[in-house]
Image (spheres, rainbow, N blue to C red):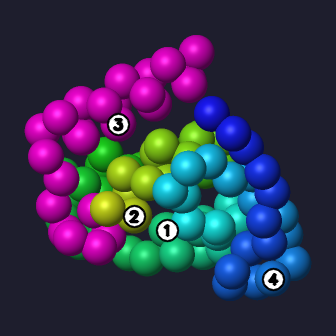
Amino acid sequence: MAKYKQLCIRCKKNYVEMHWKQKPYCVKCELEYLDEPINDPKFKKLFNIDRKLYEQSYFLRSIKKNYLSYRKLSDAQIEAFKKTVKELSK
């Protein structure tokens, strides 16, 4: 898959390594969005992981953004999130 770099569309300072159909937000801007508080105790516990894992993985940031947008996740998304966290924690 082709990769290229593009400026972040929020801060216009940092370059983002792009893949197909990805929005060009740098990690810093995405993490600012992900700091929104979560009220549901189940998801609060799920997303309470080390910030470094979010910095490393676009996938984890994407799952959390989906939750913040729609306030729900499918069982498959939850399992994939947990599996990825376990793999990255090793």
The residues tagged by marks 4 and 3 sit, at their Cα atoms, a distance apart of 29 Å
Residue 66 vertical placement versus 88 (above, below)? below
Relative to 67, residue 58 above or below:
above
How far is mark 4 from mark 2, CA to CA?
21 Å
Front disc: 4 or 2: 4
- The reply to whether the magenta stretch includes residue 71 is yes
Q: Which residue is mark 2?
A: 65
Q: Nearer the viewer, mark 2 or mark 1?
A: 2
Q: Point out the image quarter for the N terminus.
A: top right
Q: Earlier in the sequence, mark 3 or mark 2?
A: 2
Q: Which mark is residue 34?
A: 1
| Three-letter code for the amino acid on which mark 3 is drawn | Phe
Q: Which residue is mark 4?
A: 12
Location of mark 3 (residue): 81
Q: Relative to the observer, which residue lies in front, 29 or 15?
A: 15
Considering only order in the chain, which callout, 2 or 4, is on the residue closer to the N terminus?
Answer: 4
Circle 4/circle 2 CB separation < 8 Å: no
